[in-house]
Image (cartoon, rainbow, N blue to C red):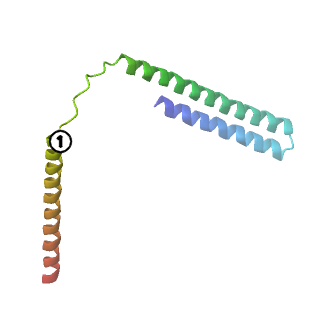
Amino acid sequence: MRSQRALLLGAAAAGLLSLTAVAGAVSHLWWLVVLALAVLLSTVLLVALDADRRVRELRSFVRGELRRTEMPEPRAAPSTEDVVGTVRALQAQYTGRLDRLQDAVEEMLRRDERR
């Protein structure tokens, strides 16, 4: 909620500064245009620098958390029988799904033919 409020406030401030720059240009008050645009660009720069700082902090935090986690012991590679069994089980599931799909399509076609 706080970030949305800050975003809306920032958008309103940017809109106000842009309107000030346009009004200054219409009134031929070029110092006002330059001032409004300078403030707007400085604010954009500060926001970009803050975002970069936050990304760097988050990156270092995540690296630290990853270092602190205990790495599990590596498991042995699955045997050929395990892989073949898994593939056969997946194949049977897939074939069953295709059979059910084909039955449903054929039933729907039969219903359409009766009409």
The residue at the far top in this view is 68
Up-down relation of residue 31 to residue 90 (above or below): above
Q: Quadrant of residue 115?
A: bottom left
Q: Quadrant of residue 65?
A: top left
Residue drawn 17% across the image and 54% down it: 91
Q: Position of residue 48 (x, y in %)?
A: 62, 31
Quarter in which the N terminus is drawn? top left
Q: Position of residue 53 (x, y in %)?
A: 57, 24
Residue drawn 65% across the image and 35% down it: 13
Residue 52 or 74: which is nearer the viewer? 74
Residue 26 or 64: which is nearer the viewer? 64
From this viewpoint, is residue 113 visible?
Answer: yes
Element under label 1? helix
Residue 16 or 115: which is nearer the viewer? 115
From this viewpoint, is residue 115 visible?
Answer: no
Q: Position of residue 112 (x, y in %)?
A: 17, 79
Residue drawn 86% across the image and 39% down it: 29
Residue drawn 79% across the image and 33% down it: 35
Up-down relation of residue 110 to residue 103 (above or below): below
Q: Residues within 10 Å of mark 1 (few under 14, many from 20)?
A: few
Residue 102 or 12: which is nearer the viewer? 102
Up-down relation of residue 32 to residue 58 (above or below): below
Disc 1 target residue: 80
In the rendered structure, the answer to whether residue 13 lies left or right of residue 78 reads: right
| Amino acid on which disc 1 is placed | Thr
